[in-house]
Amino acid sequence: MKISMKNRCFQLALPLLVLPLLIIVGCVKKEGGVASAVANAAASNEIWLGEYGSMTGSESTFGVSTHKGILMALDEVNKTGGINGKKLQLKSYDDQGQAAEAVTIITKLITRDKVMLLLGEVASSRSIAAGAIAQQYKIPMVSPSSTNPKVTQVGDYIFRVCFIDPFQGSVMARFAINNLKLKKAAVLRDIKADYSVGLANYFVDEYKKMGGEIVADVSYSSGDVDFKSQLTLIKGKNPDVLFIPGYYTEVGLVARQTRELGVKAVLMGGDGWDSEKLTEIGSDAIIGGYFSNHYSHEDKSPVVQNFVAQFKAKYGEVPSGLAAQGYDAAMVAVDAIKRSTELSPKAIRDSLSQTKNFQGVTGMITINEERNAVKPAVVLKVVGPQKFSYVTTINP
Amino acid sequence: MKIIQKSILLIIALAIFGLNYFLEDNVDGYVLRVIINCGIGMILAMSLNLINGCAGQFSLGHAGFMGVGAYASALITTVLTLSPFFKTDLGVGCAILTGGLAAAVAGYLVGLPSLRLRGDYLAIVTLGFGEIIRICFLNFEQVGGARGLPGIPRVANFFWVYLWVVVTFVALLRLLRSSYGRAILSVRENEIAAESMGINIAHYKIVAFVISSFFAGIAGGLFAHFQSFIDPNSFVFNKSVEVVIMVVIGGMGSLSGAMLGGIIVTLLPELLRAFDNYRMVIFPLILIILMLVRPRGIFGHKEIWELFRKKASS
């Protein structure tokens, strides 16, 4: 085939022909940046908040629950007149559970929709990815339930309203010593998950500090199915408590094997236990175990009961922990906007960082200097197949 | 002739460079991000087009190659703090190139079974490869595991991505016009006939795999240094399917078709954001209609300029 030179020029120029097309679609930037967003907000009667979450995809239940909680909170505020007469508006986008999508839409929320504040995400990995963009544009972000410590380390505009993973370790240590009066503990940690390692480290520290004794500290890797050698070692030390801060699959298997070997210790863990699969895998062996969690709809305090009743009336279902966290994230944000001296992302960030003793559904929330929430955890007891009952609330 | 070609390329590079500054000043961050995502999509689609469209093999593991490139380059710039050089533009460029080479090695390994398998069977092997790669990243704590790898220097901008789009386009176009490319095409048309003409089928299949995965690795490296965050979830099976859709939409075997496919599949879901959660219903619907109207893809086997030429002559 003979290719003329003219033709070849055309071929090479093709990418250049494609580019203007793209630009036409994109069109030219609307005037102004963040500064004009502030001016707009001051003038208009609305305050725009942005939400990003996994409304579709494999984790869609998380995103949808959180979204319901946020919507309910904003409705409530708008019914009582909004903030200084300004109504709150929510712009929410779906990230399909993909970090790349989350990054794209958070850019859209900031540069296109000019939101004042961002709410999201549930998964820590996506909060970290999108948080970097929020930090770059200096727009405050509040994560409802990303518990990994790294999330708020992204920058000083990133906050969360949940406690971080390691905190649960100290909660369970205190619960074992103060409530159950058990002073000899063994720890079985999952060395492959930094979630589990964090929990185990804080448990050990707090337990020793409170006068308890750690008689054994052994580990497994997620995916293991046989724990007999570790458990035999633990049995020899005869502990009162066995702390297993892992995920429900391994925890269920461990529970079965503890009972087979005749270990009598009380089993304990963190929110990794929170799944209906736990009792399916662990069957009777796991019953009687305790684990920490963010919230329980069985909590008798009026705030929680009021929230549960209203949520049921609106959506016809019992709110999950994620819905409660979403509600609290939105409420903490609203509280911060109310207290902020002016309607600008910077001022809202400052007032967010001063959040103190805010009464949320999931407990009293105080934001510390690392922009994490200091708040209580609840302890649940496994009482039967897929049944967890509320035991107590432990304050930080 | 050579000089003219070189100067054209130089002019294009300069134009992209200039456009980069124009866009950064005049277009908001979201639009720029979508434009760059389109560029990455184009590189992915063009590279997969070599295996699926030109060599006639069916690969479903493109996200795996992309992942290898992304993680290999991010490993150099982020995890192994070798020297501050790897935080600069040029250093990241080298890292992305290394990522491409790492993906090419992976492509060679996956290309080997393609000598024995074809069609659906090869698709399953490549699919398996993609999953293995992802599970590996998921379990390597050094690269962040499931949590992902944050803090990758954000260096890949419009200029770098579109420079690579042009490089990929020119390289693949010239490859297809060479005797190598003709040999690859002959493998697609009829393996037995090709072999009887003295073409080493095994060799050319592997060549296609290696070159294709090299550019996929480059796309991965650009992706990593543009997002500044990667996690194994970014390279799931769905991503591979997305790239296959780009190629099929544009027309199997058509480079310009692959580019158009890359743009459509990246841009359309963004334009449909207004439809909220129905977006993911409308998007596939448009794809179905597109395939019904043009069953062989928008451009079919042809390139865009061939379509125009034909119309002009007839």
Image (cartoon, coloured by chain):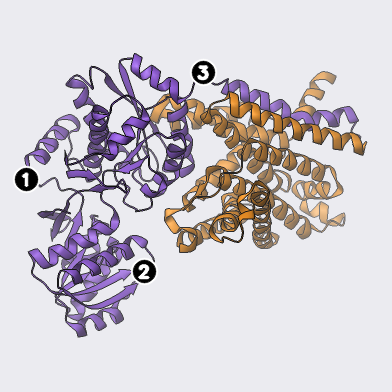
Chain colours: A purple, B orange
Number of the front mark, 1 or 3: 3
The amino acid type, in three-letter code, at marker 3 is Glu
Q: Are marks 1 and 2 in contact (CB under 8 Å)?
A: no
Residue A113 visible in the current orientation: yes
Q: Of residues B123 and A17, which is closer to you in this image?
A: A17
Q: Chain of mark 2?
A: A
Q: Are marks 1 and 3 on the same chain?
A: yes
Residue B302 visible in the current orientation: no
Rounded to the nearest angstrom, the CA distance separating label 3 from label 2 is 52 Å
Q: Are marks 3 and 2 in contact (CB under 8 Å)?
A: no
Pick whichever of labels 1 and 3 is earlier in the sequence. 3
Which residue matches tag 2? A191
The number of numbered discs placed on residues in the rendered structure image is 3
Q: Residues within 10 Å of mark 1 (few under 14, many from 20)?
A: few
Rounded to the nearest angstrom, the CA distance separating label 1 from label 3 is 52 Å
Give the residue at the far bottom of this rendering: A236
Which disc number belongs to residue A300?
1
Q: Residues within 10 Å of mark 2 (few under 14, many from 20)?
A: some
Give the residue at the far front of this rendering: A341
Which residue matches tag 3? A31
x and y percentages locating residue B211 in the rendered image = 72, 52
Question: What SS does tag 3 mark?
Answer: loop
Which disc number belongs to residue A117?
none
x and y percentages locating residue A63 in the rendered image = 33, 40
In the image, taking residue B26 as reference, residue A383 lies left or right, namely: left
Q: Residue at x 63, y 49 (%)?
A: B88
